[in-house]
Amino acid sequence: MSTRRPRAANSLVMALPPDRLDRFARHIVLPEIGGAGQSLLARAHVVLVGIGGIGSPALQYLAAAGIGALTLIDDDTVDPSNLQRQTIYRESEAGHGKAELAALWVAGLDSEIAVRLCARRLNAENASDLIVGADLVLDGCDNFATRLAVSDACVAAGVPLLSAAVGRFQGQVGAFAGHLAGQPCYRCYVGDAFDADDCDTCAEDGMLGAMAGWAGTFAALQAIRVLLAPVGGLGEAQFGRLHLLDGLAPSLRTLSIAKDPGCRACGAGC
């Protein structure tokens, strides 16, 4: 007896225009995605915070997967040192804004994707406005102050968060949903001690470019998992689970993050 899941109903498949059916045929034939899943991805809105070492490869695979709307947030410009790992930029684009270039890259790949760009630095004051309408936020920024501002805004807005980080030969990708009962937020994981911009950087510590690619593409996979969870898709969303990537071993291991009852963002007293 076959253990494969049945494919989605033909009516859901036909909700996609013929050219989109052909474009995403390799998704649609997967029982775990099918027409229903692809239609769900086409209706999804994902916010990417940081279009750098993690955000670049994540953006490539989310856009290629047919995510319907993307908000791209990054106030930085391209530096030649970025090109070792930030795969959507070119040598001739040094000095130009990453958010604008990323939007152009998406338009060149798939003109059907709605793109909103923001070349501003996300902070505690503007975070809620920048993630409005999102089904998921993927944060690949490079400092704890921004990460915590993103997390707090996601909890307040009831939006799931994927947080991804990388350095040297290690990476981590975790899914958080502190707005849900019993589920932790990112602040539950790191606490309050990191509400500052003082963190190590890859300029100081170094980073294998391919390691950023692994973390970014793994984050894209987990983003698709979260988005498809309502229809079964790739299984549960894996909220509260942190995946640790080791490029030297290589290996991947998973930790469970507990909700902090005293968390000032999602705890009982918030």
Image: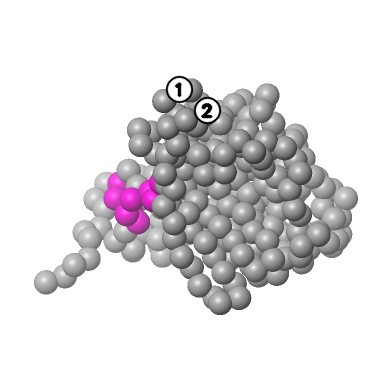
Residue type, label 2 = Arg
> Image point 52% across, 29% down: which residue?
265
Q: Is residue 111 above or below residue 263?
A: below
Residue at image position (63%, 29%) is 127
Residue 258 placement, left or right of 170: left
| Crowd band around label 2 with a 10 angstrom C-alpha radius: few (<14), some (14–19), many (20+) | some
Query: Which quarter shows the N terminus?
Result: bottom left
Which range is magenta?
A: 231-239
Residue pictured at 64% horizontal, 59% vertical: 166
Amino acid type at mark 1:
Gly
Camera-side residue of 261 and 216:
261
**How far from the left and from the top, in percent, is residue 238?**
39, 51
Q: What element carries label 1?
A: loop
Q: Mark 2 points at which residue?
A: 264
Contact flag, marks 2 and 1 (Cβ < 8 Å):
yes
On screen, residue 20 versus residue 11, left or right, reads right
- Residue indicated by mark 1: 269
Spot the residue most to the left: 1
Which percent across, then down, holds residue 60? 60, 57
The quarter holding residue 70 reads: top right
